[in-house]
Image (cartoon, grey):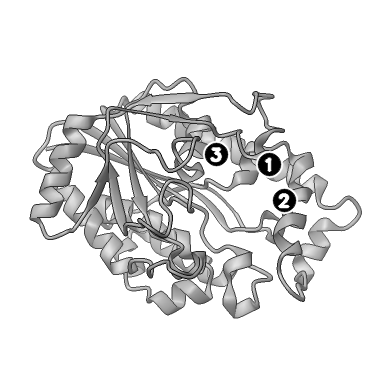
Amino acid sequence: MAEILGLGCTHAPMILNPPEEWVNMRKRIYGGIPEYQAPPSMLEELAGDDGLAHDRRNQQRIADAFAVLKEKLHAWKPDVVMIVGDDQAENFKRENLPTFCLFTGDRVDAYPFHRPSGHKNLWDAAPDAKYSYNCPAEFSRAMLAHLIREGFDMSSATRLSGWDWGLPHAHVNPLTFLDPEGELTILPLFVNCYGEEAGDGYPPRPTAKRCYELGQAIRRFLDTRAERVAIIGSSSWSHSFLTHKFNRSQFDTEFDRHNLALLEKGEGSRIAELTPEEIQQSGDHEFLNWLVPLGVVGDRPAQIVDHLEEQSQISFKVFAIWD
């Protein structure tokens, strides 16, 4: 029977940037929203210095939270690190957009700073800086076969060729903090979180229930194995520019606080009851990346390392550990 460690974190692009750059991220995002109105709480955060004081403090909190997760992950010495994230029209586009896709190759590369917004980064790394990871091809193919036989019509990929940058940012952004040297064996799982929000021709996202059920099926596979497996849910929660109930102007703090309390109490299975409409209205599309690990770890209380809920953050960010 496998030993399992669960982690949850954000992959927000701004976490790679110095805090002095965060104001530009806000301008890019909110500049594209018609008749955008900043909520009063954000105006208070931005007052005087465009939010720089808040951004500096929050950037440090994010770095500190990742440091806790990194120490836990490396001290635990996993054989496999499964990281669950979404591909936002990076490798998978409308002509081929699977609901779930398991990477079954033996190696994967990524260029996290190749995006224009990544050129100014915390590490002063060059835009073409490459991160490379070994992947457990035999292990992932055995998992794929198990899941298909359990009734999940899983897609798979032995290489990523949809663009020139390899792993999407949902997977590589956390790894720049958690495993910058490529010491760990990484197994990427892709979930179509954005669904129809990504544009015409994109299929609906899976339900929270189905993501949780996939996690349960992965757990049944792991229970037949002897490996030490860490599984990471990679995403922020509610995103202001996706929160339809607030006209895409602020994220749904109350909704996410409620779900955070469920995690702390070890009632993650109740989160799997979220409806597609609730997720859509609250801008929690990418929270589906956490539902898969929740199905794996089961109803165990989470240790909340930190959570950030200031509106200037653009999204509600949580860092968690399941021992």
Disc 2 marks a residue whose amino acid type is Met
Give me the C-alpha separation between circle 1 and circle 3. 23 Å
Residue highlighted by disc 1? 117
Q: What type is the residue that disc 3 sits on?
A: Ala
Q: Is residue 273 visible?
A: yes
Q: Give the quarter of the figure containing the N terminus.
A: top left
Q: Earlier in the sequence, mark 1 or mark 2?
A: 2
Distance between the alpha carbons at the discs numbered 1 and 2: 8 Å
Residue 319 vertical placement versus 119 (above, below): below
Task: From the top left corner, tell me how far across and down residue 242 is, in percent.
Answer: 58, 68
Label 3: state its secondary structure. helix
To which residue does mark 3 refer?
A: 65
Q: Are marks 3 and 2 in contact (CB under 8 Å)?
A: no
Residue sitting nearer the eye, 252 or 283: 283
Kind of element beneath mark 2: helix
Image position of 264 (left or right of 198): left
Question: Is tag 1's residue or tag 3's residue first in the polypeptide sequence?
Answer: 3
Secondary structure beneath dot 1 equals helix
Residue 10: x %, y % from top left: 52, 47
Residue to which mark 2 is pinned: 25
